[in-house]
Amino acid sequence: MSKPWHPFYPANVPFEIELSNLSIYELFERAVEDYPNNIAIMNGDESITYTQLKNQVDGLAAALHHRGFQKGERICVMLQNCKEYAIVTYAIYRLGGVLVQVNPMYQPYELAHIFKDSGAGWLISRQEQQQKVHDIGLANQITMIATDGKDEQTASLYQWIDEGRKQLPPLDIQPKEDIAVLQYTGGTTGRPKGAMITHFNVVNNFYQNFISYGGVYKRSSESTLGIAPLFHGMGMANMNTAIFTGSTYIVVARFEVNKVLELIRKYRPTVIAGSPTMYIALLHHPDLIEDDLRSLKICGCGSAPMPVEVINAFEKKSGAIIVEGYGLTEATTAVSRNPMTGVRKIGSIGIPLSSTDIKIVDLESGTQEVNVGEPGELLVKGPQVMKGYWKNPEATKQTIQNGWLYTGDVVTMDKDGYLYISGRKKEMIIAGGYNIYPAEIEEVLYGHPAVSEAVVYGIPDTYRGETVKASIVLKDGMSVTEDEIINWCRERLAAYKTPRFVDIRAEFPKTAVGKILRRSFVEEEKLRLSNS
């Protein structure tokens, strides 16, 4: 059935893709067979060909297999962007293991929940991160492997690879059923939930992404500057797209604008993707010259709306196209994107990818489709929709109904099928490209002995998009300073989740039944800013 957005697909982009039943490892293996001598990864001054990468992947997989790693086991990977991330990822997939993505900024409080919920018995990280496992009392239960391990007390990734083991079990992956990734995501209530992303999800969302470029992205010819963190869905999609197409992935350990500009000048990448803060930082760099960005041709932007003036200025300096899109963890990575050629509507999150269907339903019942131009909750159906939440059938049933993923995002659609974000049904904060869920921070605040009530919300920030603010009410007879509250959070949460501002109040606005009126805090901030 024809959809409003179909006429706006470039001529070489199909409405539907032929769905693949390959596993992730099989797609990786095909790239190695097709492009054995291409450079797969640039890591500093070190280059790794596809053949070399596969040898290391299979060597690690054989070492894990020798030590009893079984299909379906969960293994936490807690690394910044590095060449080892690729080795580890594809080795886990070779064995049918489940990659549990862990942000290396997480503190023991956050890490304890992920280990407990996922049941992971393995960790791959840098040696310094392993102290966190000791801090939460799990060191005797977790097999820890260090990417930089050198002493006899630490299992070393490269020592395992260098053992030269060859014995591997038969490749046994059921792509639609077998989980490839547990990607933890927050919510309006409770602790983060593990989104179960299958091999089928990852492979087909790659094809959806690749086809949407309409031939602009060339196999074996591109070089991607890996800025987005690999523990995030966007970063993993960037690496997979580069590797699956025989192109080159250039490692960026973390975003530091001086280092990124240096890498752009040195390697002349053709593809980058990241949050608006990355583009803003590059544009405002005092040493940026006219030629610096001219190698770029595809610039992806997601996670937060990009200011129109930033798009225009960056495109003018680079000659590239900034492609705004939309995705969420529960849909693997990508749902919609502005076309690379044809009609591109700046400020829109584009049109649904091939083989993706959407509905926009009323916010009250979630059952009635709204008219063109009216806001409603975005529902998504397609091969990228997750299998469900790990060990959480109740949350899965609420989020996926009759095959439709309820995203929690409020959008409008114009007559041509282009989508525009207008708000969030979930009270999520997006700061510097990171998704932050107030409930998780509020739980930490309620653990403070002086806090009686707490509410967390996002306030506008010219660089980060939003930043975190907390308002609290103290228990009778208790006192605390703003700095003490911030430090309490900093000890228990990753830095990007820690409130930048704390507001201590005598009482909160509430409904007649005593529910805190979170929106009133947001509206109060908007009013304050408009009057300042």
Image (cartoon, rainbow, N blue to C red):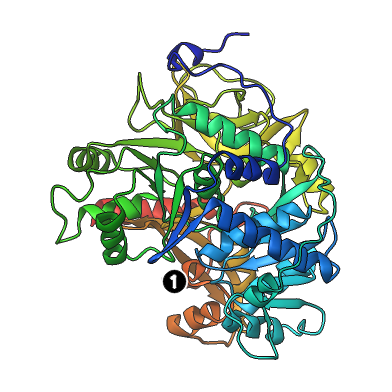
Instruction: Decide: few, some or many residues near mark 1? Use Cα within 10 Å; few <14, some 14-19, many ≥20.
Output: few
Q: Which residue is mark 1?
A: 503
State the residue in front, 430 or 58: 58
Give the residue at the far top of this rendering. Answer: 1
The image shows residue 184 at horizontal and vertical percentages of 66, 57
Q: Is residue 532 visible?
A: yes
Q: Is residue 446 visible?
A: no
Q: Residue at (48%, 78%) from the top-left corner?
A: 486
Horizontal and vertical percent position of residue 267: 31, 54
Q: Nearer the viewer, residue 289 or 501?
A: 289
Residue 200 relative to residue 361: left or right? right
Could you say which quadrant of the image residue 43 lies in?
bottom left
Work out whether 4 lies above or below 312.
Answer: above
Residue drawn at (77%, 48%) of the image:
179
Q: Is residue 395 left or right of residue 337?
A: right
Above-or-below relation of 169 to 489: above
Q: Amino acid at mark 1?
A: Asp
Q: Residue at x 76, y 68 (%)?
A: 63
Residue at 63%, 45% (x, y): give it: 28
Q: Secondary structure at mark 1?
A: strand
Pick the front one: 422 or 88:
88
Query: Residue 154 appears at what percent x and percent y?
Result: 68, 85
Quarter of the image for the N terminus: give it.
top right
